Image: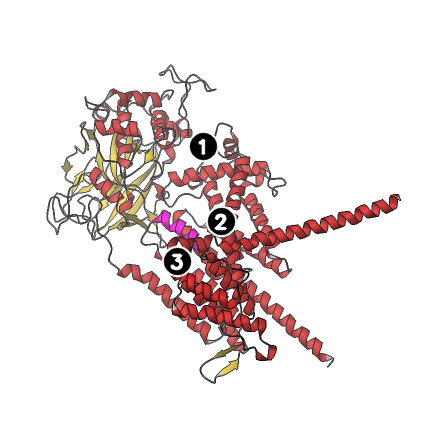
């Protein structure tokens, strides 16, 4: 007998240790699932060091939660400590120089967060994937992943609802997949789904581990041994893993086996046009083709390339250069000549400009039947087979033979990466006479408001490069333009005027209008049509799809040649040389009497960017100490500290208000239907579920009356109705039958779930969403809080009365 308490204590300690072990496993599984979903962000952001930081920050957050639960802390303080730790970590990695002691956040830190979020939003709109991992983008990624990780940890560990934890994971993956819109990103889907499967299996192992016995068939029940624990609670867990693996494989392979919509890009297996070749199109209107393909509902890979370029974000693939503006349209006036010997010369490039030799291998899909080979500019040589001609304007190879196209062709391009300096662009000499005469020509019918607008926007700019940057910044920021592919296409003078008035359009409108405005300022300009760099794939290649079709203006600077600009907001990426700090006005230039003095004048407003000047880590490396000064400048855009605090606080409050009822019901349902919870707990869950679907409980009804009313009002099916009555009968036996007459507890949890499924099937879609997100039974939370508040007030009043009585006695 004396040994019995010690044995009982040993068993209880073993159970507590086992429960803690299961919580650690669930926390680790939640961390793995979050990290797997975050992998979907890899093709969107350049580099991978940020992913290592994400893993470390998320692991720290998870470890703090495990430590707090091991110390016996309840869920609210544990979550609060995890959230506080996450804020401190974000402060250390993003705003340590603004924190108290490099750690504690203050108003300056929240002001820094606001400005970085504003800068990150601008970077997302400016760069094409993969975007450089700027500080703003890093903060958005770190904060978003930590928030998702905290939600997954709370749902999976203390609330024991791994299925519900899939919602924030799905949100994280959906954001990344929606931005990428790449059909070849299935490895990231498999990774995210595998992480979620790990989470489900961890929860399943925990639940199976509490059963204590499993059955291999009639009469084959046996206790669970140590080997079964290792295997994950026996054959059911192994079967679950097999089912999960098969389901994951089917989900990944099924889309590839289903038929997809066709469609071409400049032009992919078009049905009209010149030439034969099985319906391939050899010549197209680039404006119509661009709009058609940008509006395709699904993206489709047409090119894949591998390059050794140190700046892959500059890998724009030029297809054709439109140099002649007739007033009705932009066209290419260049003749196709025999292919000259290499290396091909670059028009206007002087020896003093820094260049890098780059080799790129490009493979076109079988469906890409274009007669021109898309190549990076400037190309020096293209290694391929066939009887091609040379397009001097686009500096690429073209075919006049309907049987010769880019379809299925692999070719290698030797080209240059041209990197001019600020001085070289700002102090570029006047262009050659033949270049200026041809590329500044505008039609007689071009309305005068085009030139008037151009001069108004560039007022105060002292040189052609400053004027070009002012035009670009006006289109992408201060001009209030919007990107819309549904706007009617057009490239003539009338379309340009309509675009300037309506201020909405897609890339051809921005490119044609900026080129025309530049020509009115005597800056040589043309329009290039081709593709943005595409999406980096796991193997180091880049994938270009039909949604990468693009048009951009190119302006000529003597000594550098054709320089790309990006006026289309949110599309492509603005080159380094088009940043405002590259185009600082030359204060000593005597050519413009309206050049502003070192301190800006209020009488002559100059176009300024809406976001602070920042160096680009992907281009400049270490940004140096200038960035905090630029971001703290009062005339720069950003969110004030109190706005940032309001944003974060308001977002958290909104999330709590919207997700609170759902989380409470999920937790209550899990506890009430857990094994051993009891008959009355199952009955309460059934009543609350009915209340969520519009059938409130009545205090005067017996369980049988309540069950019959629920069946009658909702019109439940036979199976669900029988389940409701079984639960009601079990409650009556629990309440009124003598102990010896009570029957053994049956599968009441299964009956409650069956009844809930029947209620859900008979409800409208709106009612189902209402029952999920805004359950009526959540009013119990309000009543519980009210009762606790009343009890607390009562205790405080009683304590105050005792203190008052004690003071009265002392005075007496």
Viewer-side residue, 181 vs 715: 715
Q: In the picture provided, is 233 more to the left or to the right than 413? A: right
Disc ID at residue 658: 2
Question: Which numbered circle lies on residue 613?
Answer: 1
User: What main secondary structure does the magenta stretch of the protein show?
Assistant: helix
Q: Is residue 344 visible?
A: yes
Which comes before the other along the chain, label 1 or label 3? Answer: 1
Where residue 763 is drawn, which disc sits there?
3
Report crowding for label 2: few under 14, some 14 to 19, many 20 or more residues within 10 A (C-alpha). Answer: few
Mark 2: which secondary structure?
Answer: helix
Contact (CB < 8 A) between labels 1 and 2?
no
The front one of 565 and 651 is 651
Question: Secondary structure beneath disc 1?
Answer: loop
Q: Nearer the viewer, mark 1 or mark 3?
A: 3
Q: CA distance from mark 1 to mark 3?
A: 55 Å
Q: Mark 3 or mark 2, which has the lower sequence index? A: 2
Q: Count how many numbered circles sit on residues in the image.
A: 3
Return the residue found at the far front. Answer: 700
């Amino acid at each position: 007998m004396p040994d019995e308490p010690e044995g009982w204590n040993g068993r209880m300690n073993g159970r507590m240790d086992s429960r803690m072990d299961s919580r650690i496993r669930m926390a680790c599984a939640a961390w793995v699932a979050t990290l797997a979903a975050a992998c979907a962000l890899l093709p969107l952001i350049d580099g991978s060091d940020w992913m290592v930081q994400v893993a470390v920050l998320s692991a720290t957050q998870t470890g703090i939660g495990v430590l707090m639960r091991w110390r016996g802390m309840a869920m609210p303080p544990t979550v609060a400590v995890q959230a506080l730790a996450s804020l401190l970590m974000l402060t250390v990695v993003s705003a340590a120089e603004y924190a108290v002691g490099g750690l504690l956040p203050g108003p300056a830190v929240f002001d820094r967060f606001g400005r970085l979020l504003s800068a990150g939003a601008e970077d997302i709109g400016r760069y094409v994937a993969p975007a450089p991992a700027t500080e703003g983008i890093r903060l958005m990624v770190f904060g978003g992943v930590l928030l998702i990780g905290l939600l997954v940890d709370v749902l999976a560990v203390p609330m024991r609802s791994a299925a519900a934890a899939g919602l924030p994971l799905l949100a994280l993956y959906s954001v990344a997949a929606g931005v990428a819109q790449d059909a070849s990103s299935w490895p990231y889907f498999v990774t995210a789904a595998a992480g979620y499967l790990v989470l489900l299996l961890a929860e399943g192992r925990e639940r199976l581990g509490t059963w204590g016995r499993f059955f291999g068939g009639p009469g084959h029940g046996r206790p669970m041994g140590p080997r079964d624990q290792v295997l994950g609670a026996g054959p059911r867990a192994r079967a679950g893993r097999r089912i999960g693996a098969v389901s994951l494989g089917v989900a990944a392979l099924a889309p590839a086996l289903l038929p997809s919509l066709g469609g071409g890009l400049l032009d992919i297996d078009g049905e009209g046009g010149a030439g034969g070749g099985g319906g391939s199109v050899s010549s197209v209107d680039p404006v119509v083709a661009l709009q058609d393909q940008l509006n395709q509902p699904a993206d489709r890979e047409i090119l894949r390339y591998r390059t050794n370029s140190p700046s892959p974000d500059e890998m724009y693939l030029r297809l054709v250069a439109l140099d002649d503006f007739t007033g009705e349209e932009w066209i290419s006036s260049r003749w196709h000549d025999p292919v000259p010997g290499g290396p091909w010369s670059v028009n206007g490039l002087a020896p003093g400009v820094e260049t890098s030799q780059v080799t790129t291998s490009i493979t076109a899909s079988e469906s890409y039947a274009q007669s021109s080979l898309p190549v990076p500019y400037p190309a020096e040589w293209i290694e391929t087979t066939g009887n091609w001609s040379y397009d001097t304007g686009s500096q690429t190879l073209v075919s006049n033979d309907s049987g010769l196209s880019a379809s299925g062709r692999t070719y290698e391009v030797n080209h240059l990466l041209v990197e001019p300096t600020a001085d070289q662009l700002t102090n570029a000499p006047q262009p050659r006479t033949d270049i200026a005469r041809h590329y500044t020509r505008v039609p007689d019918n071009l309305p005068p408001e085009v030139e008037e607008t151009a001069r108004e926007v560039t007022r105060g700019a002292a040189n052609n490069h400053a004027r070009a940057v002012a035009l670009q910044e006006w289109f992408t920021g201060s001009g209030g333009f919007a990107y819309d592919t549904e706007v009617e296409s057009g490239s003539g003078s009338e379309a340009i005027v309509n675009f300037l008035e309506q201020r909405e359009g897609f890339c051809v409108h921005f490119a044609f209008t900026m080129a025309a405005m530049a020509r009115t300022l005597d800056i040589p300009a043309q329009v290039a049509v081709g593709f943005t760099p595409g999406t980096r794939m796991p193997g180091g290649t880049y994938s270009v799809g039909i949604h990468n079709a693009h048009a951009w203006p190119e302006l000529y600077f003597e000594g550098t040649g054709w320089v790309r600009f990006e006026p289309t907001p949110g599309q492509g990426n603005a080159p380094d040389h088009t940043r405002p700090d590259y185009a600082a006005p030359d204060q000593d230039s005597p050519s413009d009497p309206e050049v502003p003095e070192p301190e800006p004048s209020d009488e002559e407003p100059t176009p300024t960017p809406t976001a602070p000047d920042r160096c680009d880590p992907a281009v400049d490396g270490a940004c140096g100490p200038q960035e905090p000064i630029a971001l703290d400048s009062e005339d720069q855009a950003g969110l004030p500290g109190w706005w940032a605090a309001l944003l974060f606080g308001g977002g958290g409050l909104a999330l709590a208000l919207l997700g609170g009822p759902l989380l409470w019901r999920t937790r209550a349902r899990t506890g009430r239907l857990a094994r051993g919870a009891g008959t009355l707990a199952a009955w309460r869950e059934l009543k609350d579920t009915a209340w969520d679907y519009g059938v409130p409980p009545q205090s005067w009804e017996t369980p049988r009356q309540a069950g019959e009313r629920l069946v009658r009002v909702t019109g439940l099916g036979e199976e669900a109705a029988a389940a409701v009555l079984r639960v009601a009968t079990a409650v009556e036996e629990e309440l009124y039958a003598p102990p010896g007459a009570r029957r053994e507890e049956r599968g009441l949890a299964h009956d409650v779930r069956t009844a809930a499924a029947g209620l859900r099937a008979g409800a409208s879609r709106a009612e189902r969403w209402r029952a999920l997100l805004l359950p009526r039974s959540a009013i119990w939370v309000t009543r519980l809080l009210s009762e606790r508040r009343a009890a607390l007030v009562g205790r405080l009043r009683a304590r105050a009365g005792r203190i008052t009585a004690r003071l009265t006695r002392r005075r007496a």
